[in-house]
Image (spheres, coloured by chain):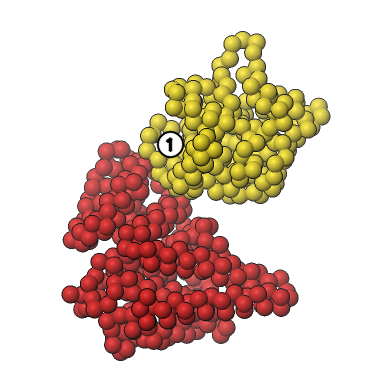
Amino acid sequence: MSGPLLHVVATILTILVVASLAGFVLERRAKDEKAIATVRNLNARTRSWWVMVAVLGGAIWAGATTTILLFALLSFTALREFWTLTSARRGDQLALFLSFFVVLPIHYALLLDEWYGLMSIFIPVYAFLILPALSTLSGDAKEFLARSAKVQWGLMLCVYAVSHAPALLLLETSVDSRLLLVYLVVVVQLSDVFQYVWGKLIGKRRFSPNISPSKTLEGLIGGGLTAILIGVLLHGLTPFTPLQAAGVSAVIVTAGFFGGFVLSAIKRDLGAKDWGYVIEGHGGVLDRIDSLTFAAPLFFHIVRYFWAA
Amino acid sequence: MTALIRRTLIVLVRFLVGARADWRGCAPVTTQRIYFANHGSHLDTVAVMAALPWAVRRLTHPVAARDYWGRNAVLRWIAEVGLRAVLIDRKPVRGEDPLGPAAAVLERGRSILIFPEGTRGSGEEMGPFRGGLQRIAARFPAVELIPVHLDNLQRILPKGSLLIVPITCTARFGAPIRLEPGEDKGAFLRRARQSVLDLVA
């Protein structure tokens, strides 16, 4: 394990240990019902973080194939959550079946095969054209445009966008490509975590009560700046200078914020609070990777255009 | 070996349909019970079984239609060995109790899972309950009757489709009901059906 990576692993473990201890103390101190509920949720989140760190860390350590397969599984679960909440008609059955069992596997197979050219257009061009074409065969024109758009959104968000995180493993830069994935995930997730923490500590002004009632302006700025600072401190994992790391982190944080925001808007539209239930305290997989869906493609493209060999 | 195959089957079903359990009105304990659920697709038997924890599942036998599950050797094997199902004839010979095999399982102290609509509804609407549930309830008054509602199964595998869309199916388990002494058959069946409908999110 290289120096900077060792630091990251040690830091993450330290943060988790501190968070677990703090949660333990807070649980004993919490008196009224609201505080107890908040602490319980916080502790559930921490417990889930241990599992998520172990699973993702284990997959990255095991190698590119394992990591890509893990992300394929995350995409599958996210797509399931998306379609459990989104309505469909009988005429969409074929398009949905193909989304899960043909398009998703082919997309990730292309990634495993390192066939970037086809991977980058397979869903945006071919799935986009072929799935609605097949849907017409069911003869149901009702809400056809909206239905086709939902099919495409599900794939773009849950499969195409998410897959740009493991796609970082294909890039040849001056550093081990696994470090780039670690960097992206750490910055984007800590941005979420610190937005939550700053929001709970000093949050006053609601940013957009209609879309995401818990997001505050203070949380947003505090969390964003903290995450950018972390991005600068971790520049050793990347080919970036500290200044470049600040710029790239700012892009990750902004994209991540809008990822969470857009997915919240969709959730409100569908009348749901969480996407799913599989991650204790967080909701669904899509609740946890919402920011990654927007940050991953941007980070991937920036690194690929400016730093890849 | 059989245990391993059963386990694999359950993992596969959980992967395909989520099979999430939501215990609203009762706990997942090994008390002898009659679970009765709405019927949405051929997957519903496996969906409920996959949602039950192992300790409960091993004591619970789904009651399944012989004309579907007994159709070929593979389905029959999945039903009888994989799911510990009892197969019944939906159109029995005159004078025979179609639920006889299910009653025999209850006599042994095991739980059963039945689908009182008898046949899959064509739309979202749940069909009326058939009389078997009342006869079983009258014969085993000490056994808890647990309503179960399965959502999304019509979307996962609609009638007449061979294509599965693997969205999450949630099995909601309600509070136990009982056949009251002297309760009219029709009234009980309507009340039982309503107890399933009340579980809709």
List the single residue furthest toward the right: B181
Inspect the image, locate mark 1, and give the three-letter code of the amino acid beneath it. Pro
Chain letter for the residue marked with disc 1 in the picture? B
List the single residue furthest toward the bottom: A243
Color used for chain A? red
Residue B107 vs A110, above or below: the answer is above
Chain shown in yellow: B
Residue at 65% x, 10% y is B95
Q: Position of residue A214 (x, y in %)?
A: 53, 73
Inspect this view and state whether residue B190 appears. no
Residue at 27% x, 77% y is A175
Q: Position of residue B58 (x, y in %)?
A: 62, 38
Crowd band around label 1 with a 10 angstrom C-alpha radius: few (<14), some (14–19), many (20+): many
Residue ID for mark 1: B158
Work out whether residue A273 or residue B108 is closer to the camera in this orientation and state it: B108
Q: Position of residue A3 (x, y in %)?
A: 37, 82
Residue B177 vs A72, above or below: the answer is above
Work out whether residue A266 or residue A298 is closer to the camera in this orientation and state it: A298
Inspect this view and state whether residue B106 appears. yes
